[in-house]
Image (tube, grey):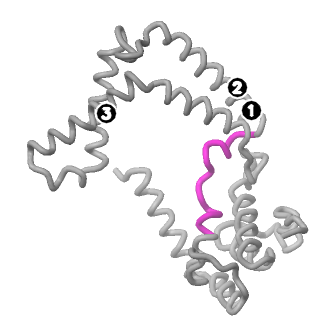
Amino acid sequence: MSSPRHFMHQEAEAAWRKLTASAEYALCLESLKGKDRKPGMLAGTLEDWISRAVMHGLAELEPFEKMTSKQRQEASKRMVAHCEALRELLIPFYDEKSGLDWPFQPDLDLAALNSAINYQDAHPNDFEALDEDEREELFNRIRFSIYHGFKNDLGLVFDAIHNGALRLAELESEVKKPNDSNVRRLRFIRRVTSNFVREFGTPHRALVLALTSVFFSTDDLDEAAISKLAPVPKRA
């Protein structure tokens, strides 16, 4: 069975093939040829830039993008509250020298072992050039590093969760209605438009519409509709 990451790579390759085989892609190349572009180390060829802009537009929605602003605010508050409540409950079981101890220590030890096994499975190249003794030594270093983190530095994890939860409340998305049937199309239009503005200083509505038509139905769209769906600040 293919892993989710492998599946995503397959999806991206299929999208790239669909893009580069389309007449709309050829139209973009011809229309943008010779246009002034923003200089940069990652500028690359025009073909590379179009592919990156399109792949950025087609990317899967992040978990926070599948939530409304209100849902993000509510989730943030609950995460912070639960995180701090659990931290406070664990304080009596924490010692400055030994960390989080009994009755949690045996399960933390097992969790560290399983995490080290997961690391070895995910990074086999780190072990393949080693002999048996070296592999065992590396595995144990990884295992006990994880164990130390679990027992002694759990507060850092709580800090990370707390801060991430606060950040969640501040995040903004290109789409306000994540359950809309056209949410993927809308985000594509807004992201590709934004990329055009950053790279060329103009939204190139006709080209955005053309690229959108490669992956989505555009029967209900024209350049005026694209302009309304992806407005550009005047300063851009």
Q: Is residue 222 above or below residue 45?
A: above
Which of 48/109 is in front?
Answer: 109
Q: Which mark is residue 77?
A: 2
Q: Is residue 4 above or below residue 51?
A: above
Q: CA distance from mark 1 to mark 2?
A: 6 Å
Image x and y of residue 6, in percent: 40, 57
Q: Is residue 69 above or below residue 5?
A: above
Q: Amino acid at mark 1?
A: Gln
The part of the image, by quadrant, that contains residue 7 is: bottom left
Q: Amino acid at mark 2?
A: Lys
Q: Residue at x 61, y 64 (%)?
A: 56
Q: Is residue 19 visible?
A: no
Q: CA distance from mark 2 to mark 3?
A: 32 Å
Q: Label 1: which residue?
A: 73
**What range is drawn magenta here?**
54-68
The part of the image, by quadrant, that contains residue 235 is: bottom right
Q: Label 3: which residue?
A: 145
Q: Residue at x 74, y 47 (%)?
A: 172
- Asked if residue 61 lies in the magenta stretch, the reply is yes
Q: Residue at x 75, y 63 (%)?
A: 190
Q: Secondary structure at mark 1?
A: helix
CB contact under 8 Å: marks 2 and 3: no
Which of 125/8 is in front?
Answer: 125
CB contact under 8 Å: marks 1 and 2: yes
